[in-house]
């Protein structure tokens, strides 16, 4: 995947973020996080700690109970507004249209963002090749393994060339070599100027990041 396209990123900043369930339990408790362009940050913590919730809030897919999320000094807003601002979310699990091919899952979002058909197909093919799926573009998503579907999700985010990339456990179903490829691609996005946040249980993946934050029982602390 080409990395010579510089991302016009700005800081993504969460301040005083609280997320409460209907029973009053706080999943996130006064979380503050500032993510700078050109950096890759790891978010670690046990299952159920709220990592996915935090990513969804940062991406505008979930509204916090209180607190603010600002991108380029403006409120992130809902998911549609966040996507328009250049924030892409790679959710945990399969978030693909199973009735479409792998390539179509990349091309359709590009067309929706105003990318021309020829450019959309070129980006899709390059992104699939970068995640080692060059020969799988015409396969229906339902024909792919879980790990392959995971890589298609990463490829879709890469093809969009957004300025903020929030990835939730993008290597959880991958073998060691493929995991290294995916992390290197995320690293390249950061090197091109993007804000990259990687939620992971994998200590090796966390070690590749510029900074690491640990989330547990709703509280966030910086590890390094």
Image (spheres, rainbow, N blue to C red):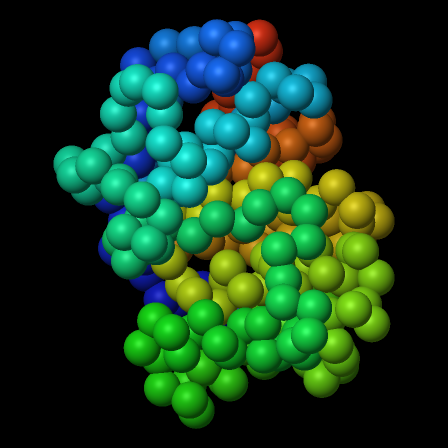
Rendering coords of residue 33 (x, y %): 36, 22
Q: For residue 216, which quarter of the picture?
A: top right
Q: Is residue 160 above or below residue 53?
A: below
The residue drawn where x is 43% and y is 52% is 88
Q: Is residue 220 visible?
A: no
The residue drawn where x is 76% and y is 62% is 148
Quarter holding the N terminus?
bottom right
Q: Residue furthest left?
A: 73
Q: Residue furthest front?
A: 22
The residue drawn where x is 50% and y is 54% is 188
Q: Residue furthest bottom?
A: 118
Q: Is residue 188 visible?
A: yes
Q: Is residue 125 above or below residue 73?
A: below
Q: How many marks?
A: 0
Q: For residue 32, which quarter of the picture?
A: top left
Please state if 178 lies on the left or on the right of 212 as rendered. Answer: right
Please state if 197 lies on the left or on the right of 87 as rendered. Answer: right
Rendering coords of residue 168 (x, y %): 59, 40
Rendering coords of residue 86 (x, y %): 32, 55
Q: For residue 64, which quarter of the picture?
A: top left
The residue drawn where x is 31% and y is 77% is 114
Please state if 77 lies on the left or on the right of 186 as rendered. Answer: left
Rendering coords of residue 194 (x, y %): 37, 49
């Amino acid at each position: 995947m080409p990395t010579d396209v510089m991302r016009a990123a700005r800081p993504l900043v969460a301040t005083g973020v609280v997320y409460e369930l209907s029973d009053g339990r706080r999943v996130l408790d006064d979380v503050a996080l500032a993510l700078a362009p050109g950096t890759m940050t790891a978010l670690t913590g046990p299952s159920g700690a709220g990592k996915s919730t935090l990513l969804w809030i940062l991406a505008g897919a979930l509204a916090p109970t209180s607190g603010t999320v600002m991108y380029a000094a403006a409120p992130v807003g809902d998911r549609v507004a966040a996507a328009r601002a250049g924030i892409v979310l790679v959710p945990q699990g399969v978030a693909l249209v199973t009735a479409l091919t792998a390539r179509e899952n990349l091309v359709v979002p590009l067309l929706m963002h105003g990318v021309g058909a020829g450019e959309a197909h070129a980006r899709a093919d390059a992104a699939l090749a970068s995640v080692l799926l060059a020969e799988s573009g015409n396969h229906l998503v339902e024909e792919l393994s879980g790990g392959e579907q995971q890589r298609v999700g990463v490829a879709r985010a890469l093809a969009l060339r957004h300025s903020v990339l929030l990835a939730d456990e993008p290597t959880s179903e991958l073998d060691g070599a493929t995991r290294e490829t995916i992390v290197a691609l995320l690293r390249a996005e950061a090197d091109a100027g993007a804000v990259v946040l990687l939620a992971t249980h994998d200590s090796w993946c966390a070690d590749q990041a510029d900074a690491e934050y640990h989330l547990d029982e709703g509280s966030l602390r910086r590890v390094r």
